[in-house]
Image (spheres, rainbow, N blue to C red):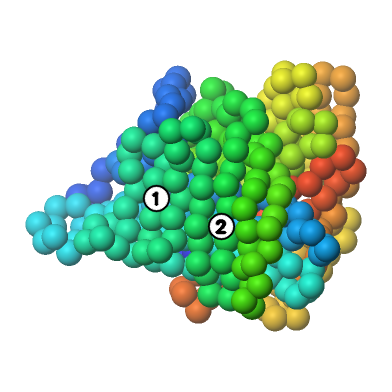
Amino acid sequence: MKTRALVAIAGLMLGGASPEPPAARYPAVRSGVPIRFPADHGAHPAFRTEWWYVTGWLDVPGRAPMGFQITFFRTRPGTAQNNPSRFAPRQILFAHAALSDPAQRRLVHDQRIARAGFGLADASTRDTNVRIGDWRMRRGRDGIFRADIPARGFTLNLTFRPTQPPILQGQAGYSRKGPQPAQASHYYSVPQLEVTGSVSRGGQRMPVTGRAWLDREWSSTLLDARAVGWDWLGINLDDGGALMAFRVRDAKGVSHWAGGSLRQADGRTIRFGPGDVVMTPIRRWRSPHTGASYPVEQMLAVRTPGGWRRFRIVPLMDDQELDSRAGGGPVYWEGAVRTAGGRGYLELTGYASALRM
């Protein structure tokens, strides 16, 4: 579950907050629809929204580790489907990139947006190959993902080699996000990606290695109207395991829905239902930029057949808030975190204000 760049797109994710014109017809996410590769690495243009989301930690010789995030989004607006004009925005692509560098003590980020076509942007339906101008992410025939992001203030040239098969989240890729069956996404993750490449900043090119996590989701409706935001966590464990957990919050901060998975070191996967995930704030950080208060340090408890397992989640640095209001988007916190025996990313939405259309 990933925060989107624009208020309009956040509204698309929340789903159903305002009526769509009759021209808009989106397929529902249904249980029992199989995930198929390589096609499901590619775009699903009939659905309302989807994303390719990569996060991870980068080890840099002679420097402290850094976190990074690259996300491409595709959305199908509901207002242009019957418009015969070639300029009608039938598909819109946008992207975020961010770098968490402790040397700067603050997140640096950039974004892109364009309608599909005219050589501006496109997303293949056959495999991962999504592009906005000179920003691009693709998957080669060798199965390796590659991203080239010449962002404002930094450049990411990274490759992501899978070391494990994908995790089909929820029930074989059908992931519930609320009490209604339609409040769901098709969702799979590829954890433990081996990262190589470079990061460039201020004219300096730095070779990097590391571990990353890829999330792929597509949906037409995600959240219940009572939801105001969510906490999401993906952790690559040092023993080769992978942990994902999320909770959807209501206006009182109570978990409205929750879920996730734990792939153990031996490859066996435990699925979590709403009663199996508890995320408890330990320490909050108040942003000096927006005044929002985020639970950047948390205790995560997940119920397994062997009993409850607990993970204390600690941020790489506190100031990993992303303010996209200048582009019409929301304010949220998304950053690199660590726990005993693993590193990953935490996303906190709806703390500056409830996500609304």
Position in image of residue 100 (x %, y %): 71, 65
- The residue lying at 28 percent from left, 57 percent from top is 116
Number of marks present in the image shown: 2
Q: Which residue is mark 2?
A: 157
Q: Residues within 10 Å of mark 1 (few under 14, many from 20)?
A: many
Left or right of 58: which side holds 239?
right
Q: Residues within 10 Å of mark 2 (few under 14, many from 20)?
A: some
- The residue lying at 51 percent from left, 62 percent from top is 149
Amino acid at the residue labelled 1? Val
Q: Which mark is residue 130?
A: 1
Whether 288 is drawn above or below 221: the answer is below
Return the residue nearer the eye: 158 or 7.
Answer: 158
Q: Which mark is residue 3?
A: none
Amino acid at the residue labelled 2? Asn
- The residue lying at 30 percent from left, 41 percent from top is 46
Whether 213 is drawn above or below 334: the answer is above
Whether 3 is drawn above or below 310: the answer is below
The reply to whether residue 252 is in sight is no
Query: First in sequence: mark 1 or mark 2?
Result: 1
Distance from the alpha carbon under mark 1 to that under mark 2: 15 Å
Position in image of residue 171 (x %, y %): 56, 23
- The residue lying at 68 percent from left, 58 percent from top is 207
Left or right of 167: which side holds 285?
right
Return the residue nearer the eye: 267 or 287.
Answer: 267
Position in image of residue 21 (x %, y %): 24, 55
Question: Which quadrant of the figure contains the C terminus?
Answer: bottom left
Position in image of residue 162 (x %, y %): 60, 34
Mark 1, secondary structure of its residue = strand
Return the residue nearer the eye: 248 or 187.
Answer: 187
Task: Verify CB contact (< 8 Å) between mark 1 and mark 2.
Answer: no
The reply to whether residue 305 is in sight is yes
Instruction: Choose mark 1 or mark 2, whichever is in front.
Output: 2
